[in-house]
Every structure is written in structure tokens, then in C-alpha cells.
Amino acid sequence: MAEKIKVVVVDDSALVRSLLSEIINKQPDMTCVGVAGDPYMAREIIRERNPDVITLDVEMPKMDGLEFLARLMRLRPMPVVMVSTLTEHGAETTLRALELGAVDFVAKPRIGLATGLQQLADDIVEKIRIAARAHVRRLPAAPSTPNPAPARASAHGATAAPPPASVGSASPLRLSTEKVICIGASTGGTEAIKEILMELPPDAPAVVITQHMPAGFTASFAARLDSLCRIRVAEARDGERILPGHAYIAPGGKQFYLSRSGANYIAVVDDSPPVNRHKPSVEVLFRSCAQVLGPNAIGVMLTGMGGDGAQAMKAMRDAGAYNIAQDEASCVVFGMPKMAIQAGAVHEVLPLKQIARAIMERVALAGVRHRV
């Protein structure tokens, strides 16, 4: 029989510690090997019990949860699932935790805590299972240099950013306004998406994104990306036109897909049911990209658990799209790219750091073909 997943629960609330340990111990494949009310207690339990996964409250006494997470990921990296409140501040803190190396997060209910956590039990234990299999990387000892303010295109199209790099011996990239970059992601995707978007020039094609994330978090996610990137980033709004130089993120708890109005691509955001248990669903977005964009789509499948979007990505390829999947070594969880590859949906499998460059090379090639 396979060994059970060993979990340590770190939370300043005795009620939450009791509820989470009860939920975990009810599972046949996991066991709670310790609970701690603050990071100092947690440190000793981690040394003694050597857990496979930690659940960690964002707001902790004696030492901030983020500070503890940063120290843990530098000195003894291991899978962490953060527990966060559904507030604007909680969302921003959770995004910072994902940057520091947390695998995923659970949105702690603000009222009806006992009932709310029990209702979230299936989600909690599934995230723990995924975390136990995740690729966790050590956080660098020194903090990274802060990113400079991004250069933006002005109202007249001028920008202070350097021109896009040339591809091989070709002339500098000339970008097609018809192309649309279509990205799907889940576990580990927030950081992967950030890395790609930060590499795109201000005049890049439009980007449409579905990242599995609950309502209340995607607005903060979009705002954070907008502050870091040279393209503009926002939650998608129903009925708005999809424009170059902009990225549109599916709002949590909604479905996001594309339609067409004349020559324009239009965002549709609605309350239609979950697909593949997800809302937003990559399948929904990518299926619309196959139908609406056809060969004007560049599909990208990033890190995530499960197979959401794999079949729709195959439909994109059949419609003429060029598709890229993140490779296993750079994924936190290889499930979604793996399923897309197995479905025959993917042209290239690349490390995360090479994907933005590959996208822009495809855009440049399309521009050359168009001029010819």
C-alpha cells in the first residue's frame, strides 16, 4: 500500500486547525501529522515530522505567514497550500505567496467558518494531493531586483520601450493585429503567465487567458500583472473589443470566450455552467478560439492539473492554430500540457523561459507571409 501524504496544518485559529486536521484524516490517502498555531511551533514540527505538504495561514502571529513561507522556500522548500481570506488584501497577499513558491491556495470563508470549510473539503484535499506531486523550487537567497515601471504605448502609439528584437537575420518584428495569443493554465499558472506577459512588447497581439482561479482573486491578479507588464492587463469585460497590446483574464467564477462582430473580436463573459468542473474553463475559451480565430490563434497550454482544454486545443490545431505546451521540467504540475500533447494538439513543447520568444517568432513569421 502506498504511503499516506503527511500534512502539517499551520493556522492561528484552533477551530481551523481542528477542522482541517479532521478533513485530512478522513481521507484514505493522507494523514495530518501535526498542527501548529504559529510559525515557530511549525518549524519544530516540520523538523520532527518531515511532512509532504503544509497548509499555511496567510495571517499568523509572531511571524507573518509570507515571511515564514519565504524562509521555508529558501531553506527547506516543500509543497505549501496557502489558506487565505476572500478580501482584496487577502487576494494580494495570496498572489505574493504564489510568487514565493506556494503551490496553490484555499479561499477561507469569511463567515460560517465551520460549515464553509466542510463545504470546501473536496477542494482542500484535492489541492493537497496535487501539491504532494508538484515540482517545488528553492527560492533564491537574495531578493530579485524590482522591476522598472513598464513602458506603455501612448494614445498615439509611441512608446519608450526598445523595439522588439529581430528574429535571426530577419528585419525587426512586424506584428499582425489579426493574431491572438490564447493561454490556458491552472496550478502554478499565475507565475508562468506573469513570466510570459512580462516578455511581450507593448504592440504584441492581443492575449486572452483562462487561469483557474475563484471569484475575488482575478481582479488583483490582473492589476498586479498590469503594474509589471508593457502590455495592458485587465479582467475581461462582456462585450469589449479584443485589442492588440492588451491581455484579458477570465474573471473568477465566470466563463470567458470570444465571438466576432464584423472584423472585430469581442469578449463574452457570462454565467454559464462549469465545464470540466471549472468556471472559468480553458475548454470554453479554447473552443471559441478554434471557431472564431482559426489560423489567427496561437495557443499556449501552461502548468496545471487535469485535462481542461486539451480537446479544445486539438480543435484549435485542426482549425489552423499554432500551439505550444510548457515542458514538464518547468511545470509545477505537468497534467494540462501532458494531456494536450497526448491529444495531438501541440506543435512545440518548450521550457517556460522560451515560450514568449517562440510566440513572437510565430507572429513575425505570420507578418512576413502576409506581406508576401
Image (cartoon, rainbow, N blue to C red):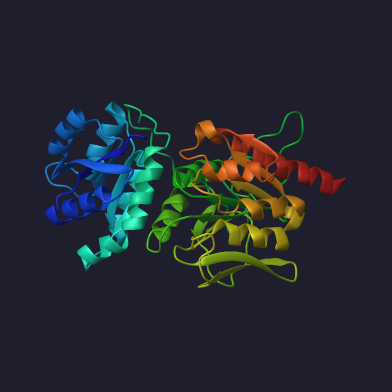
Q: Is residue 366 above or below residue 107?
A: above
Q: Nearer the viewer, residue 1 or 282?
A: 1
Residue at (22% x, 38% y) in the render: 68
Q: Is residue 172 above or below residue 193?
A: above
Residue 200 visible:
no
Q: Indicate left or right for 23 with 323 as reference.
A: left
Q: Indicate left or right for 90 with 250 as reference.
A: left
Quarter of the N terminus within the rendering: top left
Q: Indicate left or right for 86 with 62 as reference.
A: right
Residue 233 visible:
yes
Residue at the far front: name it. Answer: 1
Q: Nearer the viewer, residue 8 or 244?
A: 8
Residue at (73% x, 54% y) in the render: 296
Q: Nearer the viewer, residue 89 or 159?
A: 89
Residue 24 point in image, percent of width and height:
27, 49
Residue 287 point in image, percent of width and height:
65, 60
Quarter of the C terminus within the rendering: top right
> In the rendered image, which quarter is residue 67 located in?
top left
> In the rendered image, which quarter is residue 62 located in?
top left
Residue at (31% x, 35% y) in the render: 52
Residue 65 point in image, percent of width and height:
22, 44
Residue 146 point in image, percent of width and height:
38, 38
Q: Nearer the viewer, residue 255 or 167?
A: 255
How many marks on residues?
0
Residue at (33% x, 53% y) in the render: 124
Residue at the far right: name it. Answer: 372
